[in-house]
Amino acid sequence: MSSTPRSAPNPRLASYSTSMNEEFKKILNKVDTCEVSVPAGLADSIILKIDNNAKQQAKLKTLGLGFVSVLSIITSVPIISQIITSFTQSGFYNYLSIIFSDGDVAIVYWKEILLTLAESLPVIAIISLLIVLAIFTWSVLKTASIVRNGLATA
């Protein structure tokens, strides 16, 4: 064991500790309390490498999530077209017009009209659109979270 006195803990270590893994912080605290001679600048070098690696991973995640966002928008266009076509082909608008054209008939046969409207809905296309929109929303929120944390900046 070396008898050289240990200097005060590195301030960069303290500021970076908020995003470090708990196990790594415990190990560094143990090193701080031991009388071990560590080359000057080693801790700064390690923290700089970890920080650069985290920024690189954040940039890759942002790029990947951006690709997913664009892909989901592109995918939603044919799905919306399919929904519009399905509404027209199934006669949904015709059944819906019965409600507005003849209120008395709609009141008497409301159960049958609602069942017919439900049967004429393009359910698969609507579910597909909702899935694509959920993927788009997730990717945008995840990207915003990465950018908000400042990891994806230069």
Image (tube, rainbow, N blue to C red):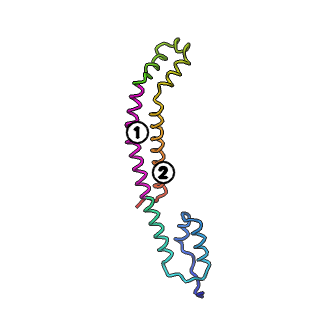
Name above or below for residue 80 compared with residue 51.
above
- Tag on residue 142? 2
Q: Residues within 10 Å of mark 2 (few under 14, many from 20)?
A: some
Main secondary structure type of the part rendered in magenta: helix
Q: Is 35 placed left or right of 81 in the picture?
A: right
Residue 100 on image: x %, y %: 47, 17
Mark 1 element type: helix
Q: Is residue 58 magenta?
A: no
Residue type at mark 2? Answer: Lys
Name above or below for residue 94 compared with residue 7.
above
Q: Earlier in the sequence, mark 1 or mark 2?
A: 1
Would you say the residues marked 1 and 2 are in contact, meaning their CB atoms lie under 8 Å apart?
no
Q: Residues within 10 Å of mark 1 (few under 14, many from 20)?
A: some
| Quadrant in which the N terminus is drawn | bottom right
Residue 56 on image: x %, y %: 43, 62
Q: Which span is picked out in magenta?
A: 59-87
Measured Cα–Cα span from mark 1 to mark 2: 19 Å
Q: Is residue 73 magenta?
A: yes
Residue at the spot x=47%, y=63% of the render?
54
Mark 2 element type: helix
**Between residues 81 and 53, which one lies in front from this camera angle?**
81
- In the image, farthest residue toward the top: 104
Q: Nearer the viewer, mark 1 or mark 2?
A: 1
Name above or below for residue 17 compared with residue 108.
below
Disc tally is 2
Residue type at mark 1? Answer: Ser
Residue position for label 1:
76
Residue 5 on image: x %, y %: 59, 85
